[in-house]
Image: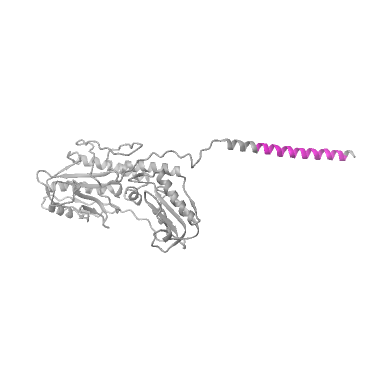
Amino acid sequence: MTDLQLGLLIVGGGIVATVYAFNWWQEYRYRKQASKAFARNESDALLDVPKNMVRTGEASRMEPSLDRVEPSPDRYEPQFAEAKLEEEPAYQPPAPVREPYVEPVVAPLVVSPVASPVVAKVSPEVLAQPAAVVGDDHDALASSMLDPTLDFVAEIHAIDFIAAADLPVFRGSKRVQVMGLTQDRRWEACVPSARSRYKELKVGLQLADRQGALSSEQLNAFCMSVQQFADEHEAVVTFPQRSAKLAAAANLDEFCAGVDVLIGLNVMAGSRPFPMERVRLLAENAGLIRSPEGAFQYRSDSGKALFTLSNHDHTPLGNTSSGLTLLFDVPRVAGGVSVFDYFAEFAQHLSVALSGELVDDNGKPLTEASLGNIRKQLGVLYAKMDDRGIAPGSVAALRLFA
């Protein structure tokens, strides 16, 4: 073997040894990094779910007060501070008349009292909120019916088309809305009577309403119902992160509890009860309409109630009344400050025309200063709703405060 061959052999062996050593070092480095990564104590997204501290809603939610009361971890029970003359009156109205929808439109009205020398003219100008344009924008329709900030939305992707008639009633203690993507790629609200067929579905469960926040038990029952349906149709279903949605539900419910206010103004009779024929004439001249339930309602141009006039003792209106109550559901009325001005003006006019007394629920008289203070607090509540992106009287507000 010559010196050249020996040198080449040594050089080749050195190169092989170098490559082997480099590969061993790389393997050792990656193995060490992997060991460190798997040694971390990461939390499980499904198992480590914190306890959801929510209000336990009853069959009907109690009427709130203008004075903010922090909810306890177990239940939100609004307290009513005793009103002080010329200061901050609080109101504890009777059970509200729940209306299914409130249109954000108020027509200018003129109060024309009967047999009274005073004529109060009130012309509230309230801008109507434009409804979502549906037309060809079907994504806008889907987003208005289902909102990730208000709903827990499960998405179902099927292999074969699913007929609308085959859709079950998904279990949910709160509002459940199903949207389907039709064969012509348009989103629509699913109803059993429709002849549409879908390959994609969105099933939403509302996070909160006046009964309280969505609980983990309610959410689990809903997810099981959706998963069972998906398995039966060999479809794939995806869910949002549950613990995050439960936390969002509690936060949303806490916000709603802080702005959920029902204002009641009471007109009480003295020694003689009010004749209901007289009340009827005053109400109708002010633009109120008698509802099938018996109460009078002040309505928008489209016929939706904005505030109500009923008996103070919850009984049906008869021939006479010892007291009347006007109710104003704050978060459900768009342009609420202007509507409240008309609401308060009519209450004052009613008390003068009937020779009654305008009082709070503690029987203390309400003055201009008292009503002005309520108006200021009302502006603060509406500002909070606007900051949250939930406009008073909007679709979102009507859903949350139902």
Q: What is the x, y in percent for residue 97? A: 25, 49
Q: Name the one closer to the observer, 57 or 184.
A: 57
Residue reaching furthest to the right: 1
Q: Name the one closer to the observer, 216 or 383.
A: 216
Left or right of residue 50, residue 34 in this image: right
Residue reaching furthest to the left: 271
Residue reaching furthest to the bottom: 195
Residue at the spot x=9%, y=46% of the render? 272
Q: What is the x, y in percent for residue 183? A: 47, 62
**Magenta residues, start to end:** 4-29
- Quadrant of the snapshot with the N terminus: top right
Which secondary structure is most common in the magenta stretch? helix
Residue at the spot x=25%, y=38% of the render? 80
Q: What is the x, y in percent for residue 36? A: 60, 35
Residue at the spot x=68%, y=39% of the render? 27
Q: Is residue 334 magenta?
A: no
